[in-house]
Amino acid sequence: MGGDHGPSVTVPAAVSFANSEPNAELVLVGKEDAINAELKKLHCTSHPRITVVHASEVVAMDDTLEIALRRKKDSSMRVAVNLVKAGQAQACVSAGNTAALMAVSRYILKTIPGIHRPAICGIIPNQKNAPTYMLDLGANVDCEPQHLHQFAVMGSVLVAAMENIPRPTIGLLNVGEEDIKGNDVVKRTAALLRADHDKGVLNFYGNVEGNNIFEGTTDIVVCDGFVGNVTLKASEGLGRFVKNVLAAELKSSPLNMLGALLARGALKAISRRINPSRYNGASLLGLRGLVFKSHGSADKYGYEWAIKRAYDAANNDVLSRISATIASLMPQQEMPAEMTDSGQMIDLSEQKTA
Amino acid sequence: MGGDHGPSVTVPAAVSFANSEPNAELVLVGKEDAINAELKKLHCTSHPRITVVHASEVVAMDDTLEIALRRKKDSSMRVAVNLVKAGQAQACVSAGNTAALMAVSRYILKTIPGIHRPAICGIIPNQKNAPTYMLDLGANVDCEPQHLHQFAVMGSVLVAAMENIPRPTIGLLNVGEEDIKGNDVVKRTAALLRADHDKGVLNFYGNVEGNNIFEGTTDIVVCDGFVGNVTLKASEGLGRFVKNVLAAELKSSPLNMLGALLARGALKAISRRINPSRYNGASLLGLRGLVFKSHGSADKYGYEWAIKRAYDAANNDVLSRISATIASLMPQQEMPAEMTDSGQMIDLSEQKTA
């Protein structure tokens, strides 16, 4: 039901995905009438692998966490996450309110033992024509070194499973490459990652800078959710800026228009390659269940991509691989009482997500 | 002497600037031989408004602060900043090592009374075809609310003076627009800025997000140096990525090449408009003297732009305007002992700059 377009995008994407993946089963959760109307438009009211589960409420993009968690107990988001919790679905995909999706998922699914805080892991296209996985993109605006350390471990397992890279490289986002650069949290995180690297557990590249995200220097870039969120949004903003300037300048004279017409294949390819939403579908990592967040503005193609990512994650057993790695790496880690995921709502009010 | 190109860029830029501004006097500081060789190439060995001051040493791009501050006491950077201190120059421009320039400037010039920490204020092009001033871009990797507050005040005075905007708008970089978003530092900073807004002292817009930088939502964007540095470098990285993709795709077929040839005017305009270094010349704000930092990779055009910015800042009396505003706004502010600028080097080792 969520995102800028709701069922008019999510339902066609789901149908298209079901048709392209003969082993996939899809459960469409939300207002029955709205979903069935879209299915009818697609002449797909009785697909053998698509079922509809009714949920009477919808979390709005501007709902507070309080409303999403306490008032709308029959929201499509919550019902979908409950299906994951109950084992009736192997993953959940939503284009809705990110903060609400994280809060609901965390409340219902809880975190993996050893993980203090879940993180949002997104994918950014890079110059090597490959994906850069980046986390956290906004779930945690304040992070301690142990959180960033856990993000690195989770990201590493995710990339190994999804991209079939046995030892993906991890970069720690910083203001310079040298060890002496950065603030205290980053320096202490680097020490943790270096120790894991020396044990052969993680493939820690070292510090990376903002430009390295797009250069594809490392498979994974680790940062706190404040920096990650601002950087992602700035990049999206610059991407739109470039697109608008491109469109305006190429229309500025008949000669430019003719040139653009001739080179339209190249211009489309450019637009596709630099689109930060090209790899749609961010993972909410660290939960006892797979939850994926589509960009709210995703079109059918983008949303289908997010479903595919969720499907691949389930098929590649990402969840148990993360749990096993965390358990083996951090068996003895003391977890401060206020960081355990007791299911209380106290901490969630502090979980700001964009 | 600094930057990627040294005197082969800085000297021609200085000569060109001197010729375009009949009231400007330029002092070229560095290795006499190298500078004179460049002046000779330009047939400009006896320009009436250009003098050369010899400095026997050069701070290298990878020199530590220790070396820049304690070993190279006759560096071009230090001699130039000393000219500002002595009142023999009204501003200093350098393309050299940013961290060293900040440390040397801070050591020699000291900070303005009431300013705890200097900041780097750069300019980013936005969709409104106007500049977005952003600070801090990397001088301070950890900031308290009072630091961000001071950055906002200094940025506001700078923009008012340089852009002739009486009440420039100030945005606080955050992960969302709502007041409840962000970490503790950002929330407390917002409270300080809101109080100044209510007093009519600052024009505080509220929180802005990463995309707003390029949308030109506010004249000024305030953030800590970690976030600012990562965001700027990520944007530069994305800019280069776009440029490379553009070049590659437009060469991918004869048709695309023809199109690019016809539209080359538009493509040049695009490249110019999205270039983050278009407005070259970042201000080191908060010092008792004007110091400007050119991008290390600046060409002659870019470096000349940085000189022009320094010249305009001196002509517009930016320094005394900042000092007066700070004095009137924060006369009674208690300055913790460890934050006063006593000229000791202790704190500087913690001043990490990219």
Image (cartoon, coloured by chain):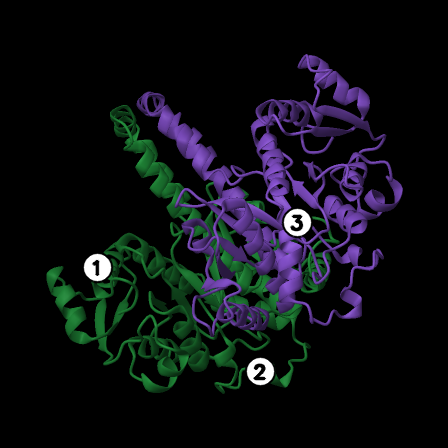
Chain colours: A purple, B green
To which quarter of the image does residue B322 belong?
bottom right
**Pointer 3 and pointer 1 on the same chain:** no
Q: Nearer the viewer, residue A87 or B83?
A: A87
SS of the residue under disc 1:
helix
Dot 2 falls on which chain? B
Separation of residues labelled 3 and 1 (CA atoms):
60 Å
Q: Nearer the viewer, residue A91 or A172?
A: A91
The residue located at (88%, 42%) in the rendering is A71
Q: Amino acid at mark 3?
A: Leu
Whether residue A173 is situated above or below residue A234 in the rendered picture: below
Q: Is residue B12 left or right of residue B314?
A: left
SS of the residue under disc 2:
loop
SS of the residue under disc 3:
helix
Residue A319's label in the rendered image is 3
Residue B340's label in the rendered image is 2
> Is residue B15 at least partly visible in the picture?
yes
- Image x and y of residue B160, in percent: 53, 56
Dot 1 falls on which chain? B
Residue that numbered label 1 is attached to? B12
The residue located at (76%, 47%) in the rendering is A105
First along the sequence among labels 2 and 1: 1
The residue located at (64%, 80%) in the rendering is B335
Separation of residues labelled 3 and 2 (CA atoms):
51 Å
Whether residue B45 is situated above or below residue A60 in the rendered picture: below
